[in-house]
Image (cartoon, rainbow, N blue to C red):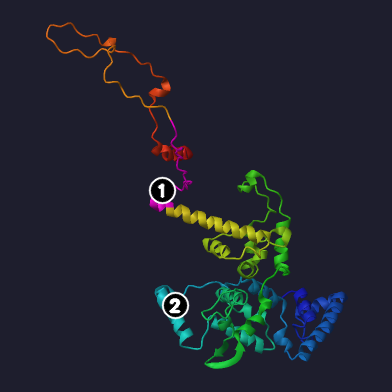
Amino acid sequence: MGLFDEIANRATGATNPNQRMSPAAERAMAADSRVSRAVAQANERGREIRQQERDQGRDPDESIKTQDEQVTAQQARLGNLPEQQPKIDPMEIFTPKTIQVLGTLVDTIFGNKVVGQAVLEKLKAAQEDPNKTIQDALNEMTNREFKEFIQLQEKLTTPGMNFLGDGPNKAFLDNTLFVDDEDTGATIRSLLEGSQEGIFGIDDPLVQNVRNRLLNNPELSFFQNLGIGTPDEFMSQTEALKALGPRAAESLRVLNPEIYYGDLDEKGLGFRARTTQELENLAKMDISSANKGLARAIANARMELDRMRGGRDNQQAGIPSIVTPPVTPPVTPPAGPGKPIVPFPPYMPNLPFPPQLVQGAPQFNYGAFPQFNLSTYAQQGIANPNLAAFYQNLGRIA
């Protein structure tokens, strides 16, 4: 620990002012009077902070964190610690998914456990411990447990009707939490409403910092949009999500989609959906109450899903993805008075008739028959009206 950290811990009350300084700090105090004055001021401020903690019924040695602990807590809040990352459980690999789901259902239906039991127990313990905050409980959770926490918080706002028609998950939220088969008396609703300080919002310094960087992004040229020569100061969505961390990104996407998908000029981040599951979740949202950016994301998600499903269905059937417009059948005009049909006369004395074959008679000149010079249009034949729809569709495809 450096001299600066040692003085800072005394100023925040994390270190007992009566505790002796390290040998290096004592040498620095002896060599420079300014260091001695800084240590004295830090000790005085630390005593005041520690007394305030005692007045509120907390132990300052437990409730006040050192500089190193604060850095660790900040990384834990973002979900970046190694112990928070998903781990491979051999039992989950070799146990069929159906059996895992059935085991959870058995505990839920026939026991006193509810969905998110472990998460709710940690929230309950934090609310009862005066030396522990809700954020401390969230920092101790794995990223998988934090995702369950966000899903539980979503039940407070999601208008999902249960089988009794009581409203938004009312039956679940009104359940009381059982721990070791004992009723704690605390409803799930009260536990979730009392732990909303762990939800990331637009006023969070981390979110504000990322949004400010996105606002300052330079305009990209055509080739820079393709990833060629992109400036170093440009922050992409991938880089922004990495800066937010998995927990802030999950919290904003599920609980504050108007910030996650909203435009930058309406206090949003302007993110786009990246997975099919995200598209499906967006398509289910109410577009009427969304802001501009979120409404556009919902509309784009619905169109993209419609395109994906339509293209897949047509390819499976071997049909190109061309929607044939409705064909209007040809309109046959009503029959009216036309030219009279003149029957061929049975006998015309001026027309020559084929001669009878008489042996030794001269050959008949067939050129004596009258010649009919038909126009080009007449030689094309008469179009079949039943093929009009076929030629109309053929013209559209071409």
- Residue extending farthest left: 359
Whether residue 51 appears in magenta in the rendering, the answer is no
Tag 2 secondary structure: helix
Circle 2 Cα neighbour tier, 10 Å, few/some/many (<14 / 14–19 / ≥20): few
Q: Can the viewer see residue 18?
A: no
Say which of 48 and 167 sits in front. 167
The image shows residue 266 at horizontal and vertical percentages of 72, 61
Residue at the extreme bottom: 182
Q: Position of residue 196 (x, y in %)?
A: 67, 78
Label 1 sits on a secondary structure element that is loop
Q: Nearer the viewer, residue 205 or 184?
A: 184
Foreground residue among 9 and 325: 325
Kindly identify which residue carries mark 1: 319
Q: Quadrant of residue 250?
A: bottom right
Three-letter amino acid code of the residue under disc 2 = Val
Which disc number belongs to residue 101?
2
Residue 352 relative to residue 137: left or right: left
Residue beneath the point at 35% across and 16% down = 372
- Kindly identify the residue that appears in the image at 57 percent across and 86 percent down: 175
Q: Is residue 332 magenta?
A: yes
The segment highlighted magenta reads 314-337
Q: Position of residue 85 (x, y in %)?
A: 55, 72
